[in-house]
Amino acid sequence: MVTDTQPVDWAELVSIALVGTDRRPVPQAAGPGSAAGQASQDPALVLLSQAALSALAWRVGRPPERFEGTLPAPAPADPRPPLPEPAARRLRTILESYPKYLPEWLAAVRAAGYRLPAAFLPPLLDLGRTNMLIRVDLAAVAGEPGRWLVATGGNWKYLLREARSQLWPEDWQSPDPDDRIAYVAGLYLTDADAARRLIRETWAGERVPVKLGLLALLSRYPDQEDLPFVQTLIRDASKQVRDEATLLAGSLERKRDKPQPPDFTAEVARLLAGARGIGRDLHNFVMTRTGEPWPLDGAQLLLDALVEHGRRADQPAWTGWIAEQLQVALADNAPVALRDRVAALVAEQAVATAPGGPGVNQASRIDLVSMLALLDFRHDMLAELAPPIF
Amino acid sequence: MAGTINPAAAQRWSADRVHALAPDASSQRAGAKLAAPGPWRDCGAQSAVGLLWGDCKGSGAKPYQVTVELSADQGTPGYACSCPSRKFPCKHALGLMLLWSAGGVPEAEEPPQRVRDWLDARRERAERSEARKAAAAQRAAREGDDADPAAARKAAEAAERRAAQRIQRIDAGLDDLELWLCDQVRSGLTGLRAAGYRPIDDLARRLIDAQAGALATRVRELTHCLNSPEDWPERTLAEFSLLHLLIQGWRHRDALPAPLAATVRRRIGLTMAAAEVAEVGEHASGRWLVLGCRDLAADKLVERRVWLQRETDGRIAMLLAFAPPGQAFGIALPAGAVVEAELAFAPDAVPLRAVLVEHTVVEHTVVEHTVPNQDTKPNQEAESGGEGPQGGTLDEAAAGFAAALAADPWTAAVPVVLDAAVPLVGPKPEAWQIVDAKGGGRVPLLASADGADPTRAEQLCQSLLACGGAHPAPLFGLYRPAGLTPITIWNNGQAASLW
């Protein structure tokens, strides 16, 4: 037992324990009555007893160090109203299970002008790192607190190159490349022609990081009129700039030589007529147009064709896969207004399959119920984000 | 709809509270996925009695039939689902509860027949088990009184024999441990470090055989000490000396003050059953704020720790619950909730562990749809009138740790609330710090305890920064001299759980 003894120096005990008491003697602790007891004891036990006493002081540690210096600037206030509770819950569901609807959701939040719960910023900023499509809306929704978070301690520097909530002329004068790029990105959103002019006028004097950022903006908002200018950049002094410019010029040239993409509704109608229903060509065309909003009349045409397809039992088996793909694409890209039409079809189907109804073989082989579920999800998602009433 | 509270909405649970029922993170995710109206048919709820039902379309032709009963205040919730999942509650039950919490389940007058049948069966089971318990109690009382004193004496003797046998085993295990410690100290710790995991694992197994489970866990953690890059000799010798002290404490337990003896027994592995704590422990009741919650995956069980703080005096209690992976915990209390509860503290040199004797969750009213007023200023929409925790400074935390160490030398960390904490960003998670804007101290931020996932550490730092916005804010965490592990941060009276 350790009583009344003066603790032996902790560092010394540690160095003895490292090599072992077989090789180094254990010092006797000073104190009344301890020496006699210890002399007869195993030196290892003596060491452990002394360590128990000395370790306590080591484990208490030192009081917290003083903080000298200034605290970091706190996050700026966000004057926007907070995201409504149901929408915040929905965001959780979207992040977990429906990331494909995140672009549409972010655009709606941006339009409604809500501010995000701060806890969601890190996961969303992580997604923006790989998903370029959401960056413009994400930057707007994250707002100044988002910029503060990135500037203070995140790995999401890309956000600093996106448009700010307002155009700040001093950003254009800033020595920081990110600020200059952010200014032009903002200008693109308000006046794209002015942004293009500004890029051309100041190009010669810009440094390479700014040039690369501006090239990224030029390819985000491709315009045939930029082609002659971009072609001159192929001889830029920097190799990185030359490479990026060559890529952009190539893509602009390809776009120039290719015919305009056909009108969605007209093309769907033409392909449906040609194949007398759903076919490979229609599938190929529709899949190139996912990720953009479809016109309601085109979506209607496609829905009707799908329902018709489902009613006929004599379809070749391989068309089932195509129909399934088209069905999901329709639920994801059609205007939410299509929902009512699908709901009516589901109700019709329920009547058809009910006992005494026209019969099961009349029922559609298209899974209208899961289509309706997706459309419902999008409908509710957008409804929750109706702009706040002041 | 602006800001209205309808009576059914007030009875619904918050999404956080439902999430706390999930047995693990993957069920939580799967449940959230099903919390959309799409897959659900024929849903209904009687929010007043906490009864929900619905059919969920799964991959099969037949929908899964889900029923949930959240007995209003206390008692264990009951779940039934026709799916084959062994998780409890399954994702369908969680999805239904989340949908309900969001107001997506219509109130209904009368549950369908299958729900009524299930309820009847549940009541009957509960009654039968009550009756069995009562009968057993009666029998015990009768036996205590008169009938067959010989049998009673025999049973008591058997119990005594078992207890004595366990003490003997522990004694033998501790003798082995002491021998092992002395051997290592004699031949030098450097050799033990080189020997790797094996000798420590063998010793831990030996202690498990000796029925000293807590001690075995402690011995296993020696590997963290030995693997720590900088101060491994100090940490290892300190841990050795603590093991030595525990052996001494056990051998002299009769001479120790009762609370310290209880601590020694617990640290060896002789824990007091909840029922006994409720009987002999110190009772404390009042309104308690849930400071935070952390789940730790141990061997075959997940351990959940929930910290509570009493509103009147700031006293902190810790509740412990265990569940096999995939099963529901008995307690589901999200950070920021307030409970009206009576607790019983287990006897300990530093009383902290407690059991719930009875409790009711006093939830903040669920508002359907909060539309802010024009005059709502940012960062002010929640007046934190007594909703945040009561905190102190880092220096007080350090003093609190020293005091705890003096009473219980095996203390590793103490739960603390800081009043005005600000994270200080570092180039990597290990370099972050927590600054006490009120008391002026600073300590390293310990994002991960020993052996935790380093990517998790970065996430923790970032959500701490995002949620607090570097405003001086109340922060709850675990303090040790090496640093502070944050668990919950408050911003404008809103608790944000960082785990």
Image: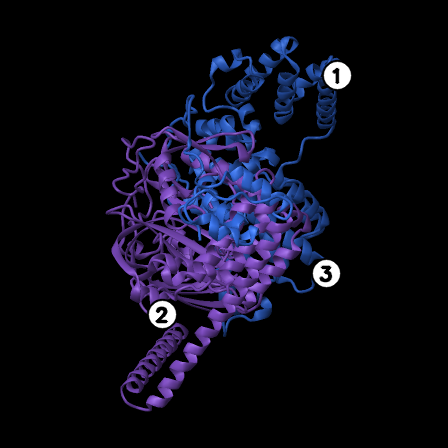
Chain colours: A blue, B purple
Task: State how many labels appear.
Answer: 3
Q: Position of residue A247 (x, y in %)?
A: 73, 25
Q: Position of residue A295 (x, y in %)?
A: 55, 40
Mark 1 falls on what kind of element? helix
Q: Chain of mark 3?
A: A
Is residue B214 in view from this perspective?
yes
Q: As drawn, is A246 to the left or to the right of A43?
A: right
Q: In this figure, which residue is indicated by the disc labeled 2?
A: B111
Q: In this figure, which residue is indicated by the disc labeled 1?
A: A234
Mark 3 falls on what kind of element? loop
Q: Point out which mark residue B180 bears.
A: none
Q: Point out which mark residue A316 bears.
A: 3
Q: Earlier in the sequence, mark 1 or mark 3?
A: 1
Q: Work out whether residue B439 or residue A141 is closer to the camera in this orientation and state it.
A: B439
CA–CA distance between discs 1 and 3?
52 Å
Query: What crowding class fits label 2: few (fewer than 14 Cα within 10 Å), some (14-19), or many (20 or more)?
Result: some
Q: Chain of mark 1?
A: A
Q: Which amino acid type corresponds to the residue marked 3 in the rendered image?
A: Pro
Q: Which amino acid type corresponds to the residue marked 2 in the rendered image?
A: Pro
CA–CA distance between discs 2 and 3?
45 Å
Q: Which amino acid type corresponds to the residue marked 1 in the rendered image?
A: Ile
Q: Work out whether residue B308 or residue B20 is closer to the camera in this orientation and state it.
A: B308
